Amino acid sequence: MRSSAFHRATIACLVLGLVLAASVVTAGAQTSLSPTFPIPYVLAPQSQYEEGCFGPCECAVLIVDGVHGGFTLSFSGFEAPFIVYDVQDIKWFVPGPNKTFTGSGRYMIGWKGTPQQQLQVDLSEDGAPPVRFDSGLVPLTAPFPLIDVTISTDVNVCIRKVLHLKAAPGRAVLLGVRVDPSDVLWDMFPDTPAYDVVFGSLSVLRATGGDFTKATAGCLGSDVAASPVAGPPDPPVGEALWYLVRAYGGVAGSTYDAGDPGQGGTCDAQINAAPAACP
């Protein structure tokens, strides 16, 4: 699989699993021994705090500074078409004015065709009574599980406080996939409503230099709610099959890619363009 005929995107996609004729190669499970939730999140350096006067009022913003810290995210439930999470253990520090915000709230994100999000938290500033910060229902600007959202106090008041938050999980969230002689199995995430499973020919993938559009042979499961799904018949002797699973929403993401930082591209567009891809 590490032949020079494959670019890095192909390798990164196919770390999930392959099956050889007359034998089975089990993909290395990538499941963490710790529970999926709560997931620690860390604010990125681009996160920013603003306090002052905002349009249409005519006055200057009083404070602009970075904000540091983190929070935890735990799956709460489904409120169709949204996945809902509890946001807890918030501790955000603004060094310039020496402010510390603590609190909790909830985060909603749409899945498959509903690219919207809302973060609503009650924050205590330096131990004062909590104040509601809300983003409202706004478009997604980063692929989940990354979070990129702006929250503020009452938008009908000229003087208000605003937090521009960019955050990422503090540990890897990986979708482990395995194959046995008859089934394709994967790690289940409680916040993922459905999964797609595709397979294809490894020899075609090699011959085309990593073209998943040509190499995708079929869909084993479209919008399936649970693992496993039955695999296709064994390939002829000397041939091999590859398998990929994509979550549809939740912290597992919505991609066939393996999340390799060195990946030179994405499998999704090519697989989606294949006639045999999942609908």
Image (spheres, rainbow, N blue to C red):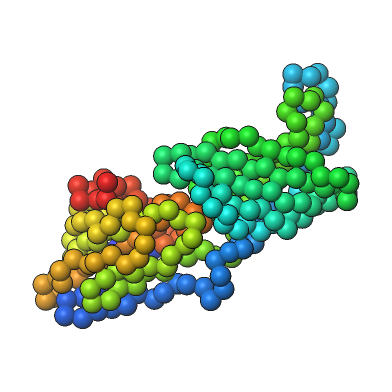
Note whether residue 45 is visible.
no
* For residue 5, side relative to residue 87 (left or right): left
Taking depth in this image into account, of 244 and 60 the one nearest to the observer is: 244
Label total for image:
0
Residue 87 versus residue 15: which sits nearer the camera? 87
Height in image: 185 above or below 132? below
Q: Residue furthest left?
A: 236
Q: Quadrant of residue 134?
A: top right
Q: Where's residue 69, x and y in %?
A: 74, 56
Residue at image x 19%, y 71%? Answer: 240
Residue located 52% across and 38% down the image: 116
Is 240 rendered above or below residue 268? below
Q: Residue furthest bottom?
A: 23
Q: Position of residue 200 (x, y in %)?
A: 22, 61
**Foreground of the two, 120 or 64:** 120
Residue 89 placement (x, y as % from top left): 73, 58
Q: Tell me, yes or no, if residue 193 can be seen here.
A: yes
Q: Residue placed at 69% from the left, 48% from the top?
A: 105
Q: Is residue 177 above or below residue 252?
A: below
Specify the quadrant that holds the N terminus: bottom left
The quadrant holding residue 160 is top right
